Image (cartoon, rainbow, N blue to C red):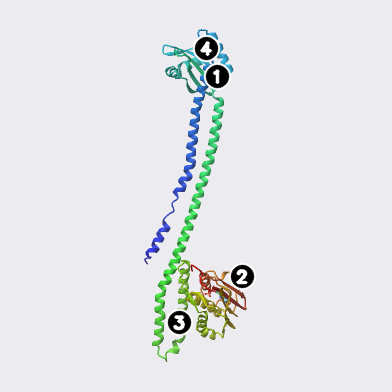
Amino acid sequence: MKLPEKLEEKVQKIAKPISIWYPIIIIVSIPLLLIINTLWNLKTFNRDINYFIRHQASSIADTIKAQITENIDNVEKIDSILSLTKNNNEELAGIAILKAENQSFVYYGGTISPEERAGIEKSGLNQMAIGFNNSFAGLTYDPVSQKNLWNVSVPLNNQKTYILFLKMRTDQVDTLLKRTSRDSYIILTILVVITLILLSNHFLFYTKAMKAREIEELDKLKDEFISIAAHELRAPMTGLVGYLELLRDKISPDQMPKVEGDLTTLDSLSRDLNSLIDDLLDVSRIEQGRLKTITSEVNIDEIINKVLTTFAPVAKSQSLELIYQKTDIPTIYSDPDRVRQIIINLTSNAIKYSQKGTVTITVIKNKNEVEISVKDTGIGIPADKISTLFTKFGRVRDDKTAEVRGTGLGLWITKQIVEILGGKISVQSIYGSGSVFSFTLPLNPIPGK
Ligand code: ADP
């Protein structure tokens, strides 16, 4: 069977996934940006330390420059100035003067041990310091202390002859750097964990949303299917009823007694089927908001009289008395066909569920509304079932209702129509004694309805 185009489109839509990428990109990019930011900050911090150490070394050099220049020919004096300087500056691991000779540098004096002297003489920082007449710093690992040391080369005078070479400890900076790095990595780890939790939540939420959407779409699809199926059933049913009539006419009077019973059963079955189709169509119209109402003056008295005339034969066959109690019946403005449908549903139920007694229809005029009640002396409804009566397919299933055919849609439809017309419906019942279904309708239509 080929599905109608609209239905097929809907089926396609279910298969189309909702875009999940935007939230994922956002969730992932925030910590990613923070990681880049942290790494960048650590790098900048390192570079700033380089500046700071060079500056510190230059300050030390500036303080002792004059003294050194003055005593440059007195190596002993130089040694004592440098020793004093080292003792006064905690972060100094060693300090020395190097002299430029034939494109290279030789140790002139200071506190550097003989084993380390060759190393500082060959340091590339010296060439750069002399070349650019500026201090240069570089980080090296000192195997003796097993720590990083900053080597700083500071040119001492404009003749480019002497260089002040300082070995500076990085302990304080290292501790600071370690602490900063550790804090940054802890924050990053927390962020990564949060990201993972967010991602997994997102996927859970996404799966749930997809399921809910699918169910919603399937529900709509089901409603449309019911609506289409009911429409399609309507034509053959009308044909069937017509042919039944024809058949009845063609049967000769002497044959009639033989088939009368079967024909009556066929009639009743086709009526049941017809009302089921009507109910299904109403359900889908209401659910899809397509139930149209046409407002005009409603003659309640006439409607009730006609309904009672229609049901009179059935009531008579059950020895039920139909009573109509009317007081001052007001003129109301509503949808006459829908009002008739409500009264038919309630009266038909009252007759269906009563084996004896009376069915009484009462009309009362209240301030701004009219109240119509259908009271019966039938089987009644168990108290715990009353709340489910107005739900779809809500039926009381017990010995008393076992023989009564029904779909459980009638009261749901009735309630929806009453509410669409701006009224309210209620029920009072005593199990075993009877029920009263009452509904109200405004005297004038609700604006916008
Ligand atoms: P249906 O009659 O087709 O089952 P309805 O929605 O009209 O569906 O009614 C729902 C149920 O409410 C019925 O199955 C019946 O159990 C109960 N009910 C409705 N009207 C009456 C009544 N007047 N007396 C007793 N029970 C009733």
Q: CA distance from mark 1 to mark 3?
A: 114 Å
Which residue appears farthest toward the bottom when viewing the image?
254
- Compared with residue 211, is residue 58 higher up or lower down, i.e. above or below? above
- Kindly tell me whether residue 141 is visible in this rendering: no
Q: Measured from the top left, where is residue 243 in percent x and y? A: 39, 82
Which residue appears farthest toward the top when viewing the image?
73
Query: Label 4: which residue?
Result: 68
Q: CA distance from mark 2 to mark 1?
A: 93 Å
Work out whether mark 2 precedes mark 1 in sequence or the reverse, and give the earlier one: 1
Q: Measured from the top left, where is residue 289 in percent x and y? A: 46, 67
> Which-is-in-front pick, marks 4 and 1?
4
**Callout 3: 10 Å neighbours few (<14), some, many (20+)?**
some
Question: What amino acid is found at the position of numbered circle 2 in the picture?
Answer: Asp
At numbered mark 3, what does the secondary structure look like: helix, strand or loop? helix
> Which-is-in-front pick, marks 1 and 3?
1
Question: What amino acid is found at the position of numbered circle 3 in the picture?
Answer: Asp
Query: Label 2: which residue?
Result: 384
Q: Which mark is residue 267?
A: 3
- Compared with residue 319, is residue 282 higher up or lower down, i.e. above or below? above
Whether residues under marks 4 and 2 lie with C-beta atoms below 8 angstroms apart, the answer is no
Q: Which mark is residue 201?
A: none
Q: Nearer the viewer, residue 361 or 173?
A: 361
Q: CA distance from mark 4 to mark 2?
A: 107 Å
Work out whether mark 1 precedes mark 3 in sequence or the reverse, and give the earlier one: 1
Question: What amino acid is found at the position of numbered circle 4 in the picture?
Answer: Ile
Q: CA distance from mark 4 to mark 1?
A: 19 Å
Q: Measured from the top left, where is residue 281 in percent x and y? A: 45, 71
